[in-house]
Image: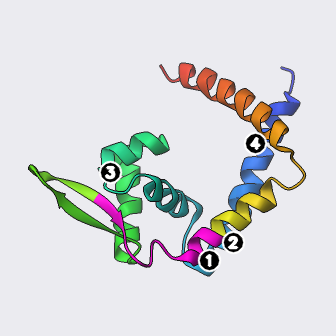
Amino acid sequence: MESSPLLNSLFRAMRELRLHYDQSAVEVGLTMSRARVITALARMEGATQAELAADLGIEAPTLKRQIDALEEQGFLERRGMEGDARKRALFLTVKGRSARISLFMDRIRDEVLEGVSPEEQVQLAVVLERIAENAAKLNR
């Protein structure tokens, strides 16, 4: 079977990014997975766990473990939702909104995309989205 340079590069980029991210995230007390949750929640505060899981494309039980840990660390909190006491909305705390976390995320993004033009980023996003859609079909 022939090797795909594109997929090999994609897998290598994912490995390197996760390794760097996890090592660097220690300075703000987060793992890559937890930082992703905080970043997503910053865009959609007040979301339920199910809504956030759908946005992140992960299973609810996996997200629950991340949310439990982030709540324990003081990065987010669960609040009851008006009209449905069984549902809980998620909100960042002051610590979760910390400029340090935002600056950390911006720095990582800038470092990873260094030398890649905005046009190349758009082209690559289109191709990667197509690959993601094809991969999703494999799971059906």
Please tell me the numbered disc located at residue 23.
2
Range drawn in magenta: 90-103
Residue type at numbered disc 1 = Val
Q: Give the percent coordinates (x, y) of residue 84.
A: 10, 49
**Which picture quadrant has residue 134?**
top right
Q: Nearer the viewer, mark 4 or mark 3?
A: 3
Q: Earlier in the sequence, mark 4 or mark 1?
A: 4
* Element assignment for label 1: helix
At 37% from the left edge and 62% from the top edge, which residue is drawn?
67
Q: CA distance from mark 3 to mark 2?
A: 29 Å
Q: Give the percent coordinates (x, y) of residue 118.
A: 81, 43
Q: CA distance from mark 2 to mark 1?
A: 6 Å
**Above/below status of 44 relative to 28:** above
Q: Nearer the viewer, mark 3 or mark 2?
A: 3
* Element assignment for label 2: helix
At 62% from the left edge and 77% from the top edge, which residue is drawn?
26
Tell me if mark 3 has few (under 14), some (14-19) or many (20+) residues whose alpha carbon lies within 10 angstroms of its own: many
Tell me if mark 1 has few (under 14), some (14-19) or many (20+) residues whose alpha carbon lies within 10 angstroms of its own: few
**Above/below status of 70 relative to 37:** below
The residue identified by callout 3 is: 47
The residue identified by callout 1 is: 26
Residue type at numbered disc 4 = Phe
Query: Do tag 2 and tag 1 residues touch (Cβ < 8 Å)?
Result: yes
**Above/below status of 97 relative to 117:** below
Query: Do tag 1 and tag 3 residues touch (Cβ < 8 Å)?
Result: no
